[in-house]
Image (cartoon, helix red, strand yellow):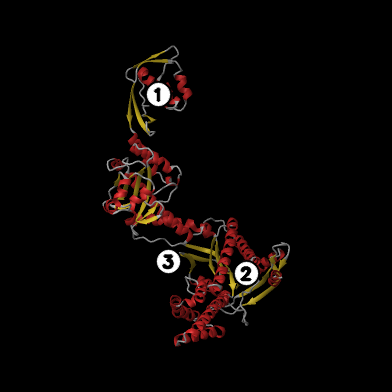
Amino acid sequence: MPENDKYRMACVIILSFCYGFKVDFKRPFFYEIPDEKGIVRTYKILYNADFTEIYPTDKAVDITEEDFNQLLDNFDDIELWKEKFPPDSYTLKGFVINNMFDVTDDTSISDIKSSLLVSGKREDEIFITNLHTTFEALFNIKDIKIGFIVYNEEDQVFERVLGKGIESYLLFNHDIEACRTALCKNSYKAIVNDNTYFAISDVEKYYKLSGGVAQYKALHDQRIKSAILAPIVDNGKLLGVLELVSNRPKELNSVNANKLIDVMPYIVSSVLRSKAEEENLIEAIIQQECTSIHPSVVWKFKRAAQKFLKDKQKIGNNVSFGKIVFEEVYPLFGQIDVKGSSEARNLATQKDLSLQLSLVDKILDEILTKENLPIYKKLKFQSDSYRSQMETNFKVDSEYEITNFLKKDVEPLFKFLLKRDSSYKKALDNYFAKVDTNLEVIYYYRKNYDDTIALINKNMSALIDAKQVEAQKMYPHYFERYKTDGVEHNMYIGEAITKEESFNEIYLYNLRLWQLQVMCEMESEYYQNRKNYPVVLDVSSLILVFNQPMSIRFRMDEKQFDVDGTYNARYEVVKKRVDKAFINGTEERVTAKGKIAIVYSQKSDEEEYLNYIKFLQSKKILDEQIEMLELEDLQGITGLKAIRVSILYHSIEDNTAFYTYDDLINELQS
């Protein structure tokens, strides 16, 4: 007990004995004393001071009711207590009777309850260490160890528990194991079927008797001598298993296993809470990684969720989640896309198939010199025909036809010959070494193409994501980006998203300028590093301007925002088709390598973006030459125009040097 508390306790006794002021300051005293095994035992001490007499000395101060009331309101003011009860002002005579009770079991159960019921304990590195010590005291066994495993009912397996320092002595070196292989028949029946504990008082004995099966082998290999396996059960449903192990035989047995009866309810509660926390965590990860909601609009979803819960309490389950709509917001759309991606992929496909058919032809020629069978001639004819078709008339369905021929006709034959005739082994081994085991075709040029697209998407996404952090600080707005053969992004800005009356069109203009500048930076970054990509590809950039505010609605079925209303749907139509639009009267697409295209319909948008372009020209981001274009009509949409301007690319070695697309390509190739 702290020294000041002892002083105050003596003062309280004096108040009662000498002045008749009753106040309860009795508290149980607990002392921890190690026994001969080194296990800490907890003792509760009770005292009886009825056989004492108290006498004031000449230093004593009379205590009035006012003094007593003052002390009641100032427990922590030790100086006040010493003022009312000066040191050496009272003498106590007589004796006090103290009784000590061993309450180790009760304390251990309380400690286990506290440890298990506090959320987040599993992440504490000393959690298991403290739990070991507590179970040592409960069982009065030194060096007892505990483990946990989770029961997966769906797959009928035991799984390791995630958490620092949490072991499993049943699983040993495995993270997951079938219940019927982890347990023997008797232990399986006890734990899984009957939900009762299974005690092994002598592991070595039963290891020999069983021939080293299931849990006996796992425990024996870890030099464990005795163990208790206790099922963690809730309403007849197995949740997991608590493992208690000792390195001495007989110490854990079916008798002291009954000590677990008092602690199992807390273990069950802990497991249930942990499962709920894990499910919430998994849901949060899915939400973040798969269906994330942009931070700028989270507040709207929270309000709708709160209303949903309130309505559910009032109405019941027959209630629907409210609509998530943002009205009067301005859209911004941009994309940086691989130019001629379909042609590039088709070319890569042709190269792979051509290479594979060449190998097939060589092997068939070798086979025909030894075995002049008609079926081999037929395969050779088909192979030659497909090679000719690729060179002259490679169509959409050609890839499927040729791939099907290679998988269904050629591969089974080659595998048969590989087993039957060793003389073909070298040629066939070389063939199969080049064939991708998963796709069952040669995947070299297409892999380079796919890897290039993936790298473009990764790097461009990372760049615009990093820039978005800065943009959000300027003014909060909704942002989403998604990967195609390049990276597209949507942005919406307006007062409805910020939920504050702070929006001004200046923030829209600022975001438009930011978008234009960042897209130039993205394209510049790509061309500066294009030599590091597996395939040399070109990209083109496009911005779509829509000058009228619109409403957007979150579509619950698709987990994404979409425009709301028939008029606004026009924007989505343009957005999906505009990059394929031709310049009016020509066969030239509006998007072009080395240039950024800004598509619009209103004169005011034209004037606005010409000002942005002029500003970026002064910053040496855009070239001086500007093209003013009219676009062909899209389906039901007329009057689209475009500004197209070349991007100036910064030299990596010399940041003061700027190049057009043609200059940069010549520089990189020189």
Q: Position of residue 20 (x, y in %)?
A: 35, 20
**Looking at the figure, which quarter contains the C terminus?**
bottom right
Q: What whole-number distance in Å separates the C-alpha atoms at marks 3 and 1?
A: 68 Å
* Residue annotated with mark 3: 557
Residue projecting furthest to the top:
58
* Residue annotated with mark 2: 605
- State the SS at label 3: loop
Please report the residue visible at 33 percent of the width from the left and 33 percent of the height from the top.
Answer: 103
Q: What whole-number distance in Å separates the C-alpha atoms at marks 1 and 2?
A: 83 Å
Q: Are marks 2 and 3 in contact (CB under 8 Å)?
A: no
**Looking at the figure, which quarter contains the N terminus?**
top left
Q: Are marks 3 and 1 in contact (CB under 8 Å)?
A: no
Residue 622: mark: none
* Viewer can see residue 242: yes
Mark 1 neighbour density, 10 Å: few (under 14) some (14–19) many (20 or more)? some
Label 3 or label 1, whichever lies nearer to me, is 1
Q: What whole-number distance in Å separates the C-alpha atoms at marks 2 and 3?
A: 35 Å
What amino acid type should be assigned to the residue bearing mark 2? Asp
Q: Are marks 1 and 2 in contact (CB under 8 Å)?
A: no
Mark 3 neighbour density, 10 Å: few (under 14) some (14–19) many (20 or more)? few
Sequence-first disc among 3 and 1: 1
Q: Nearer the viewer, residue 364 or 161?
A: 364
Sequence-first disc among 1 and 2: 1
Q: Nearer the viewer, residue 602 or 648?
A: 648
